[in-house]
């Protein structure tokens, strides 16, 4: 017999159907718990109705859940397709979302991708820091260049002023001033040309030889009439006329141009002062007493002798003995510089001659040019003070005009190129919509603008040519991958395309609108 407090066993209905259960349905669990709780009060027939409701609603919920997941997957895939490949995760190729923490694999991929992004950001910071350091060094170098140009400008102006004062107060000291300045300008020119591998020009230009010849007569052989005639004709002829022919310019801020002008204009001033007897010429330079004993053509013949000696020595030691270095491009001389000058008339004339005869014709034409310009000093300047003064004023005006052309035209062209470059940058910014340094908007997707790979290196302005200032012709350096980000996951594959952009993704749009917009874009 059972205890009175024990529950009475419930008879089992043989015809009762067992309840259906779905572990994946919350509605099934709820109905099962309710059936167990109220099973004693409800009848066996009630369980059949509950099972019917459970089967109907559970199938509808499962169908709705599957459709919702399918719609979500399609939207995710569509959003991933809209992103460029470079902005997708490197392994799976899908878009990294913040709410994908339920998938352990995606979480690991996202963590790895974030680590790579942080590493690339650090690398980019290092690159930017190095760029800033290079720009700072370049800026300091530019400051040094500007300081040197200021010193050169001050020195040039002071030299001109001092020469004018000395010419008016004590002209006998002009030869001393010329010698002191030669001791500065000529070694400086030799050092700078040697450093630039242009020292063959020191032998190829007649001006350096004439200046050394002038110093030889001034301080070692002042009693030689023949040497004075040779120096005077070469100085007042080819040397002075080169200011007009080769367009030497009075540009005070450039030490090279000041040096070129000095070695062409100062010797004519010195010899004009000496010849006119304003420097104590009779006692200090006894060779002047017999210059009228020679005819004009004999004076030209005397001046042609040292010229031929210089030309023969140059041809032997430079054109013949060092021909291999010149033709290989290791060194450069005046002849090859003029041949390669595509803008000058001399270069065009030389290129019209057969290559094996070009240099000989160049030497012959240079000799004829020197003879022509030695004729006025032999016939007129050596006897007329006014003619010499007019000639000196003319070559000084020509140098000043060339300097004015340099300052106005060359600097103007440089400023014009800067404006053109700025205009192109503004066009790029206006076409892309976002400048490269502007912060991205909070309401739009970050934009990757076109990268400007221009350097620095812009072409130099076409300035008046100075034959004492040749430009070196070196091959351009091969381009290198300065960025070093070829393996970076942040580099877009279509970054070189200026029209490439990241489409804007707006949250909250229905799926139909997204699909419709994509069809319109296609």
Image: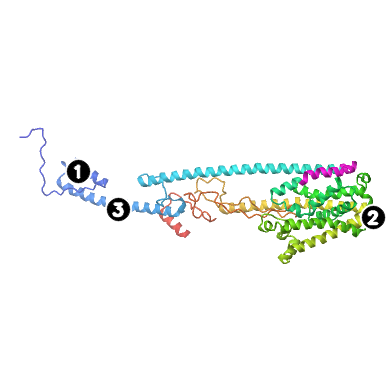
Give the mark nearer the N terminus: 3 vs 1.
1
Query: Which residue is identified by label 2?
Result: 293
Q: Residue 343's x, y, as percent?
A: 72, 60
> Residue 253, can we see it?
no
Indicate the quadrant where residue 204 lies: bottom right
Look at the image and give the residue range highlighted in magenta.
Answer: 165-186
In this figure, what is the number of numbered marks?
A: 3
Residue 417 seen: yes
Main SS, magenta region, reads helix
Q: Is residue 455 left or right of residue 282?
A: left
- Nearest to the observer: residue 388 or residue 482: 388
- Residue at x-position 50% and y-position 55%: 494
> Residue at point 71% right, 49% down?
194
User: Residue 274 vs residue 429: left or right?
Assistant: right
Dot 2: within a 10 Å radius of its alpha carbon, few (fewer than 14), some, or many (20 or more) residues? few
Task: Residue at 69%, 42% (x, y): give it.
Answer: 144
Are the residues flagged by discs 3 and 1 in contact, CB closer than 8 Å? no
Q: Is mark 3 on a helix, strand or loop?
A: helix
Distance between the alpha carbons at the discs numbered 2 and 3: 127 Å
Q: Would residue 284 be found to the left or right of residue 343 on screen?
A: right
Distance (Cα) linking label 2 and label 1: 146 Å
Q: Which disc is residue 335 wearing? A: none
The residue carrying mark 3 is 63
């Amino acid at each position: 017999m059972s205890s009175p407090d024990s529950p009475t066993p419930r008879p089992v209905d043989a015809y009762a159907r067992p309840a259906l259960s779905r572990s994946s349905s919350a509605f099934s669990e709820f109905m099962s718990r309710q059936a167990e709780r109220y099973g004693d009060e409800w009848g066996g027939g009630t369980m059949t109705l509950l099972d019917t409701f459970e089967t109907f609603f559970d199938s509808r919920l499962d169908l709705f859940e599957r459709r919702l997941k399918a719609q979500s997957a399609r939207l995710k895939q569509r959003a991933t397709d809209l992103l460029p490949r470079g902005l997708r995760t490197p392994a799976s190729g899908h878009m990294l979302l913040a709410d994908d923490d339920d998938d352990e694999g995606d979480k690991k991929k996202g963590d790895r991708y974030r680590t790579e992004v942080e590493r690339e950001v650090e690398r980019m910071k290092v690159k930017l820091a190095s760029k800033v350091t290079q720009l700072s060094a370049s800026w300091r170098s530019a400051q040094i260049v500007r300081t040197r140009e200021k010193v050169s400008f001050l020195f040039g102006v002071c030299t001109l002023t001092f020469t004018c004062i000395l010419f008016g107060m004590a002209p006998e000291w002009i030869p001393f001033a010329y010698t002191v300045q030669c001791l500065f300008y000529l070694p400086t020119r030799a050092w700078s040309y040697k450093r630039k591998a242009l020292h063959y020009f020191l032998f190829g230009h007649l001006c350096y030889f004439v200046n050394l010849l002038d110093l030889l007569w001034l301080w070692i052989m002042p009693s030689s009439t023949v040497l004075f005639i040779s120096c005077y004709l070469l100085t007042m002829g080819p040397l002075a006329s080169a200011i007009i022919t080769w367009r030497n310019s009075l540009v005070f801020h450039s030490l090279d141009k000041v040096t070129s002008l000095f070695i062409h204009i100062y010797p004519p001033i010195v010899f004009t002062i000496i010849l006119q007897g304003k420097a104590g010429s009779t006692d200090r330079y006894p060779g002047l007493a017999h210059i009228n004993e020679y005819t004009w053509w004999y004076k030209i013949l005397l001046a042609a002798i040292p010229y031929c000696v210089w030309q023969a020595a140059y041809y032997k030691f430079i054109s013949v003995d060092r021909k291999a270095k010149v033709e290989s491009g290791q060194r450069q001389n005046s002849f090859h510089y003029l041949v390669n000058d595509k803008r000058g008339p001399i270069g065009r004339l030389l290129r019209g001659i057969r290559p094996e005869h070009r240099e000989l014709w160049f030497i012959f034409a240079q000799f004829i040019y020197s003879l022509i310009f030695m004729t006025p000093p032999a016939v007129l300047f050596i006897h007329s003070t006014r003619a010499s003064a007019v000639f000196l004023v003319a070559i000084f005006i020509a140098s000043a005009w060339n300097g004015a052309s340099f300052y106005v035209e060359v600097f103007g062209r440089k400023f014009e190129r800067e404006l053109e470059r700025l205009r192109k940058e503004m066009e790029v910014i206006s076409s892309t919509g976002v400048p490269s340094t502007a912060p991205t908007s909070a309401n739009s997707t970050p934009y990757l603008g076109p990268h400007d790979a221009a350097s620095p290196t812009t072409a130099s302005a076409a300035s008046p040519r100075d034959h004492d200032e040749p430009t070196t012709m070196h091959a351009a350096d091969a381009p290198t991958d300065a960025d070093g980000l070829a393996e970076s996951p942040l580099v877009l594959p279509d970054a070189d395309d200026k029209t490439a952009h990241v489409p804007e993704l707006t949250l909250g749009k229905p799926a139909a609108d997204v699909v419709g917009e994509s069809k319109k874009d296609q």
